[in-house]
């Protein structure tokens, strides 16, 4: 038997705007320890081997931040706090149910455009 692949990847936006920038960002002094909370909670539950937390750059939903994307499933969670992250781990990652009340609104996260369709839109 081979090495099992992770069941989930959790991409946590770790982008911080430089001080004084009006643009919102996912990491500021109030939200800077969310990634640590995510990783620590996965570790405490003993599931970090199969749930891989990943620090990522801007996911282009800054106004809804802090955000994180759960794959597989393409589920984008927004306006995160430590409490919400803990609940998402219990209910979604362990329990298997998407936590709908913390998912980004549909108008900010519509169905994807395939690369092929995008190339056609651009006349390529
Ligand atoms: S800074 Fe996090 S989505 Fe842009």
Image (cartoon, rainbow, N blue to C red):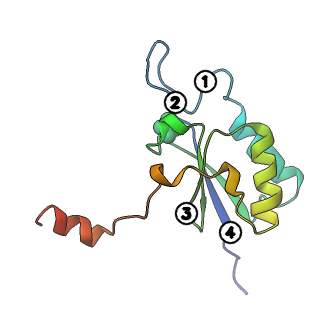
* SS under mark 2: loop
Compare marks 3 and 4 and give the one earlier in the sequence.
4
Residue located farthest toward the left when viewing the structure as drawn = 123
- Whether residues under marks 2 and 4 lie with C-beta atoms below 8 angstroms apart, the answer is no
Q: Is mark 2 within 8 Å of ligand 1?
A: yes
Checking the image for residue 74, the label placed there is 3
In front: label 3 or label 4 = 3
- Whether residues under marks 2 and 1 lie with C-beta atoms below 8 angstroms apart, the answer is yes
Residue sitting at 89 percent across and 50 percent down? 44
Question: How far is disc 2 from disc 1 in space, using C-alphas?
Answer: 7 Å
Checking the image for residue 6, the label placed there is 4
Residue sitting at 54 percent across and 38 percent down? 64
Res 122 → quadrant? bottom left
- Whether residues under marks 2 and 3 lie with C-beta atoms below 8 angstroms apart, the answer is no
Name the residue carrying label 2: 25
On the image, the x and y values in percent for residue 42 come to: 80, 53
On the image, the x and y values in percent for residue 119 come to: 20, 66
Left or right, 8 with reference to 115? right
Residue sitting at 68 percent across and 68 percent down? 6
Checking the image for residue 28, the label placed there is 1
On the image, the x and y values in percent for residue 2 come to: 69, 82
* SS under mark 1: loop
Compare marks 3 and 1 and give the one earlier in the sequence.
1
Question: How far is disc 2 from disc 3 in space, using C-alphas?
Answer: 21 Å
């Amino acid at each position: 038997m081979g090495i099992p692949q992770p069941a989930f990847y959790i991409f946590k936006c770790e982008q911080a705007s430089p001080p004084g920038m009006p643009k919102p960002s996912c990491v500021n002094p109030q939200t800077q320890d969310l990634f640590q909370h995510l990783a620590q909670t996965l570790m405490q539950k003993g599931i970090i081997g199969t749930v891989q937390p990943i620090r990522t750059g801007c996911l282009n939903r800054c106004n809804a931040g802090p955000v994180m994307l759960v794959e597989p499933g393409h589920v984008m969670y927004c306006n995160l706090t430590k409490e919400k992250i803990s609940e998402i781990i219990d209910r979604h990652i362990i329990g298997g149910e998407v936590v709908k009340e913390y998912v980004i609104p549909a108008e900010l996260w519509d169905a994807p455009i395939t690369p092929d369709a995008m190339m056609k839109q651009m006349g390529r």
